[in-house]
Image: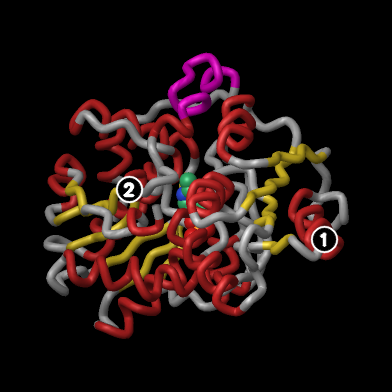
Amino acid sequence: MEKLVGQTPLLEIKSLSRLIGGSVLAKCEFMNPGGSIKDRAALQMILDAAESGLLRPRNWIVEGTAGNTGIGLSVIGKSLGYRVHLFMPKGQSLDKQNDLSFYADKLSLVDPCPFSSDEHFYHQARIYSEKHSNAWWANQFENLSNFKAHFENTGPEIWKQTSKRITCFVSVAGTGGTISGCSNYLKNQNAKIKVFLVDPKGSGLCSYVQSGEFKSEGGSITEGIGIMRLTENFKKAKIDKAVSFSDSAILSLMRYVEREDGIKLGGSSALNLLGAVYAGKKMGLGQTVVTFLCDGAKRSAARFYNEDYLKEKSIELLDFEELVSAIV
Ligand code: PMP
């Protein structure tokens, strides 16, 4: 199974290339065996922990996760002979809960509470691993194997696939592993490559990059991205510009790409593409912009493809071409 991780193809999103007068290229991370970009971090964390002896044969891999990392650790970890125990907060969509319990050996549901409390699902995973000598806590936020996965694999793949022509790199961040690993590798190859962070409303990363302080406004229905604290992985990122977009803008791009290119997108993938259009418009004609389709559209369908849910959240659909022409 581990041989199936990475080496994902680059897909041109033609309607967006036309809008920026350049190329918008997206790495198809939904083609990884667990269906997302997080398979890369999951595999590297497992390999490094096994090599250092922290993770021993038949041990339990433990992680606090409500999504893609849990699926990645389960699909890859189990194929390598480990068992997987995930902690997730109660109250997530039933679809998600079903997905995680389908893939993992064990799923523990934890009452939602603030991050500062030991009852938080993140800390529950850590505390469980401290009490059980046959358990290893992956800790994707602070574990720098996550950075390494992208520095050693994703970044080099992009450099090779664009024949060194990439001019802008765009990424969302959850743990920050993707943006830190790729930005370091790509800037080592060509310091002129511009790196853009795209953030949903409700996350503090954009303001952190702009002002050094974690401040946020509003919220977002996107999942798996945005954070209000500085992680070891994000700390290493080399970012030139950070920008934040509303759910209305994300939804508008999603519907535009579906209509023009016939491609359905997940929430973070749509935000990445919005960032790619922003980067292309800001940098001028002729850019080669690379970003990710982090997972498949189905994982966000209960939200972004559910008209009742969108109505309930009052997320308005905007004219996407107008929105793009307002970026100057
Ligand atoms: N997109 C999706 C759908 C994710 O689940 C995640 C991670 N939770 C990311 C993007 C961000 O990746 P990273 O953790 O490397 O910052």
Q: Is residue 143 visible?
A: yes
The C terminus sits in image quarter: bottom left
State which region is magenta.
301-312
Q: Amino acid at mark 1?
A: His
Residue most toward the top? 308
- The crowd level at tag 1 (other Cα within 10 Å; few <14, some 14-19, many 20+) is few
Where does residue 168 sit, x and y in percent of width and height?
Answer: 27, 66
Where does residue 180 sit, x and y in percent of width and height?
Answer: 46, 72
Q: Nearer the viewer, residue 206 or 127?
A: 127
157 horizontally vs 119: left or right: left
Q: Nearer the viewer, residue 324 or 220?
A: 220
For the point 45% across and 54% down, the residue is 39
Q: Main secondary structure of the magenta part?
A: helix
For the point 60% across and 55% down, the residue is 82
Say above or below: 78 vs 93. below
Q: Which mark, residue 217?
A: none
Q: Amino acid at mark 2?
A: Leu
For the point 60% across and 79% down, the residue is 52
Q: Check disc 2 and report its element: helix, strand or loop.
A: helix
Where does residue 109 sit, x and y in percent of width and height?
Answer: 77, 37
- Viewer-side label of 2, 1: 1
111 horizontally vs 265: left or right: right
Where does residue 266 sit, x and y in percent of width and height?
Answer: 41, 37
- Mark 1 — residue? 132
Of the numbered discs 2 and 1, the one sitting upstream in the chain is 1
- Mark 2 — residue? 273
